[in-house]
């Protein structure tokens, strides 16, 4: 597909700070190449705003190669825009047509308060991970290959879960603003591997306790999260997490009461 | 924020398994599964109405099988059985309703400000209408109990609802069943309610299997088929009763 030039109308959410009520502003994005990424298009718009002496649009972005999970905004009603398995930075303007009006909003959730414009505070995810998304066993330096036998299917599934970049699109897309897909990926990536077993049941319990404290919504299995996930994290992980949680409800012991396994 | 500065809610003593978000979902799933078992049994029991056609052809009193089945339910456990089941069902309704209400309020509170544009991609209509069908079904269950269990007179147009059979002062369930559906309005309510029920359990069956952790690529497609077939069987059979009465296939 050859390069084309687009003229677009943007409706962008502008909010000065966390306290500001916020409003939509309309901007023209002219002479946009179809080869640009969505963020490059916003860079052009921002440059224009700066030249005019106006405040540029604030947005999160970092690696711009789809692996860090920093960028993320709701583009025409879908987190990360219209393309499947694509982050905002990897969305290219060839996905749009000349004359399109594009609505750009921040991720909306009580747990993700807006800091400014399109930038939201996603540290709730970090606290959920800090509550249990780790292993505490010292693993030492790299072992010999195959010293610890792991079935290929488990390794693959764990890798699929570990693909989660924590961008928060699942929460943004969920009609309930639930973070179950994110949480289940973080539970599964460890629960599927031998190193994750010792803390498997306390992990899921602690992480769900933190999830509830962050005021995310509750999953009703709409499956919108799976549809927008830029890394194709599957609903299967939510089911696995539910299984682990069910087990923890039966087997959990309060810490420091007795020795022995779960 | 550095991890050390974070305030974590992790207090395993305070954490309650059953009232946590996922715990309430488990309660919803298990009670929902119990309801699906109940309505399946209810539907199979009502199929005895169709035996009236056979009974008429063989010269018996039409409705004998249905009445015998109804009397069996009333007499089980010296008459206490039915009250035990009713109490159990009421308990399940309260649990299911409590879990649904609290999780719904949590979810509404979780997004105080909505989107101007919101493009849904994979949510089915059944899943999106769960809360609406739930409210309609709750109202319908009250109507259904007043209509055919209590037998409020003004809900019947044909005749007095509590028809006592000639033999011994017990209720002629089959006659009430036919009478109840002679009213086109009542039939209409039952048909609409069952379509709602179908949507509710179609998503419900798929959803409780997901919540209970029954998800695997090996049988994920099967789960959808089972949900579709199960919901269609229940709705199809249930809807056939008012239609059969309206078409004079079932009569006395």
Image (cartoon, coloured by chain):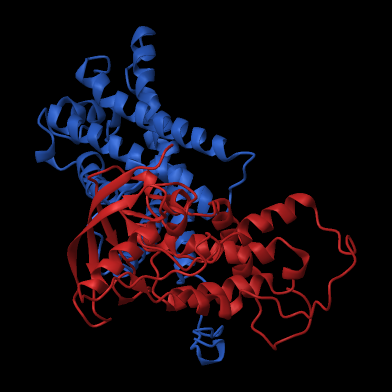
Asked if residue A230 lies left or right of residue A197, the reply is left
Q: Residue at x 84, y 76 (%)?
A: A141
Q: Residue B170 location in percent, x, y?
A: 29, 36
Residue reaching furthest to the bottom: B5
Does residue B109 sit above or below B171 in this rendering? below
Q: Residue A194 location in percent, x, y?
A: 78, 65
Does residue B242 sit above or below A252 in this rendering? above
Res A30 seen here: yes
Q: Nearer the viewer, residue B214 or B80?
A: B214
Q: Residue B34 location in percent, x, y?
A: 47, 49
Does residue A175 sit above or below A34 in this rendering? below
Which of the image's four quarters has the C terminus of chain B?
A: top left
Q: Nearer the viewer, residue A36 or A124?
A: A36
Asked if residue A260 lies left or right of residue A48, the reply is right
Q: Nearer the viewer, residue B54 or A5?
A: A5
Asked if residue A147 lies left or right of residue A174, the reply is right
Q: Residue at x 26, y 69 (%)?
A: B112
Quarter location, residue A51: bottom left
Chain drawn blue in the picture = B
Does residue B145 sit above or below B160 in this rendering? below
Q: Residue at x 76, y 69 (%)?
A: A195
Q: Nearer the viewer, residue B184 or B228?
A: B228
């Amino acid at each position: 597909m050859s390069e084309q030039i687009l003229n677009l109308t943007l409706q962008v959410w502008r909010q000065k700070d966390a306290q500001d009520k916020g409003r939509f502003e309309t901007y023209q994005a002219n002479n946009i190449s179809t080869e640009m990424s969505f963020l490059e298009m916003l860079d052009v718009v921002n440059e224009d705003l700066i030249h005019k002496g106006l405040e540029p649009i604030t947005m999160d972005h970092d690696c711009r190669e789809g692996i860090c999970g920093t960028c993320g905004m709701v583009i025409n009603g879908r987190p990360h825009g219209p393309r499947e398995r694509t982050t905002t930075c990897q969305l290219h303007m060839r996905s749009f047509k000349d004359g399109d009006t594009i609505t750009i909003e921040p991720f909306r959730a009580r747990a993700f308060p807006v800091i400014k414009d399109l930038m939201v505070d996603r540290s709730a995810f970090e606290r959920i991970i800090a509550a249990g998304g780790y292993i505490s066993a010292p693993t030492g330096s790299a072992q010999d290959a195959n010293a610890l036998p792991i079935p290929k299917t488990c390794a693959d599934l764990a890798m699929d879960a570990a693909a989660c970049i924590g961008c928060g699109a699942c929460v943004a897309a969920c009609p309930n603003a639930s973070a179950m897909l994110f949480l289940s990926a973080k539970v599964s990536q460890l629960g599927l591997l031998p190193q994750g077993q010792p803390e498997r049941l306390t992990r899921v319990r602690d992480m769900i306790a933190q999830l509830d404290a962050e005021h995310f919504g509750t999953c009703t299995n709409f499956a919108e999260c799976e549809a927008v996930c830029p890394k194709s994290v599957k609903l299967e992980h939510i089911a696995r997490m539910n299984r682990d949680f069910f087990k923890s409800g039966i087997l959990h012991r309060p810490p420091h009461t007795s020795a022995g396994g779960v | 924020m550095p991890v050390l500065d974070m305030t974590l809610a992790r207090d395993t003593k305070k954490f309650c398994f059953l009232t946590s978000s996922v715990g309430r979902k488990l309660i919803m799933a298990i009670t929902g599964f119990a309801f699906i078992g109940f309505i399946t049994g209810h539907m199979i029991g009502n199929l005895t109405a169709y035996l009236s056609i056979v009974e008429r052809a063989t010269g018996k009193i039409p409705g004998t099988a249905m009445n015998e089945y109804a009397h069996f339910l009333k007499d089980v456990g010296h008459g206490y059985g039915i009250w035990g089941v009713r109490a159990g069902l009421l308990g399940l309704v309260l649990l299911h309703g409590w879990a649904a209400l609290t999780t719904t309020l949590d979810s509404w509170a979780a997004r105080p400000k909505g989107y101007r544009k919101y493009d849904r991609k994979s949510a089915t209509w059944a899943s999106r209408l769960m809360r609406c069908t739930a409210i309609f079904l709750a109202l319908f269950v009250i109507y259904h109990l007043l209509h055919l269990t209590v037998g409020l007179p003004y809900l019947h147009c044909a005749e007095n609802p509590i028809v006592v059979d000639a033999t011994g002062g017990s209720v002629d369930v089959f006659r009430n069943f036919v009478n109840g559906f002679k009213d086109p309005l009542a039939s209409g309510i039952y048909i609409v309610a069952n379509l709602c029920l179908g949507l509710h359990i179609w998503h419900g069956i798929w959803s409780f299997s997901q919540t209970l952790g029954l998800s695997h690529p090996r049988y994920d497609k099967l789960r959808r088929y089972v949900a579709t077939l199960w919901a269609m069987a229940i709705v199809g059979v249930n809807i056939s009763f008012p239609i059969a009465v309206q078409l004079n296939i079932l009569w006395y």
